[in-house]
Image (cartoon, rainbow, N blue to C red):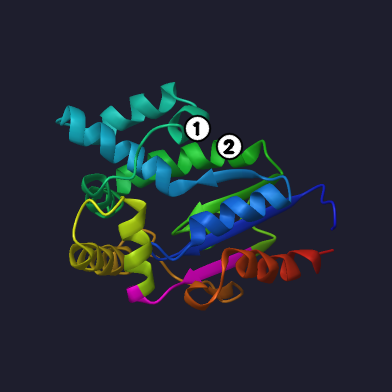
Amino acid sequence: MKKFKRLIIACDGESASGKSTAAKLVSKKYNLLLLNSGLLYRYGSKLIIKHKPKNLVNFLNKKFKKISYKRIAKQKLHSEVISNHVAVLAKNKGVRKIINRYQKKIIKVNKRICVEGRDIASKILSKNPKYDLAFYFKCNIRVASYRGWLEIKKKVPLKEVKKSLNKRTLMDKKRKNSPLIKVKDAILIKTHNLSKKDVVLKMSKFIEKLD
């Protein structure tokens, strides 16, 4: 296995496509800092649901200035209520600016990092710095729904999870600000027919080819 002085990986994909698990495993394998963008938006949603601020942009700006990513990552942020709120929040241009700035501050001081989300290759790591490798994750809706259902510990019917996933992915792809897209040079990973081990092996083949 190669040792890299610099390795910047972008992982984008649809809801419950397995991108978070893949990013986590490949980060562990190559000793990279993992930055999960979805957690940042989930944290923002949790705060808004709880505090109901009148000016959510100013409110979130203050909150994100005071908290470390490590503290965000330790919170419980995977409820169905938060999941449904996230796609709406992500459409807000002001909120995206706050979170983009937060992400770039972390990326700037880490040359070995894996950033996971929905606009990483197309926006966050499109330049200065640009990703060394980009992956795009897809999963058929039947498998994705089941994964999402297990993630929330079967607290709502599977049918509702499927409906919610379809809605969130459509909103991500259709939103005006930084929509979910697959950039031209991103490597497509279809996870519904692959085990976790297979996904990491497939990603590793491309990583090992880097100079």
Asked whether the viewer can see residue 126, the reply is no
Query: Residue 209: percent from the left, percent from the top?
Result: 80, 69
| Residue 106 numbered mark, or none | 2
**Real-space Cα distance between discs 2 and 1?**
9 Å
> Of 120 and 69, which appears nearest the observer?
69
At horizontal 46% and vertical 47% (from top left) the residue drawn is 37
At horizontal 28% and vertical 49% (from top left) the residue drawn is 86
> Of 31 and 144, which appears nearest the observer?
144
At horizontal 56% and vertical 51% (from top left) the residue drawn is 115
At label 1, which amino acid type do we have? Tyr
Q: Quadrant of residue 166?
A: bottom left
Q: Secondary structure at mark 2?
A: helix
Query: Residue 207: percent from the left, percent from the top?
Result: 74, 64
Q: Quadrant of residue 14?
A: bottom left
Q: Secondary structure at mark 1?
A: helix
| Residue 211 numbered mark, or none | none
At label 2, which amino acid type do we have? Ile
- Left or right position of 20 against 185: left
According to the image, label 1 marks what residue?
69
Query: Residue 107: percent from the left, percent from the top?
Result: 61, 42
Asked whether the viewer can see residue 107, the reply is yes
Query: Residue 59: percent from the left, percent from the top?
Result: 27, 28
Position of 176 relative to 25 (above/below)? below
Q: Are marks 2 and 1 in contact (CB under 8 Å)?
A: yes
Q: Was residue 163 drawn as part of the magenta stretch in this picture?
A: no
Q: Which of the two marks, 2 or 1, is nearer to us in this view?
A: 1
Give the residues in magenta. 134-142
> Of 199 and 186, which appears nearest the observer?
199
The mark that comes first in sequence, 2 or 1, is 1
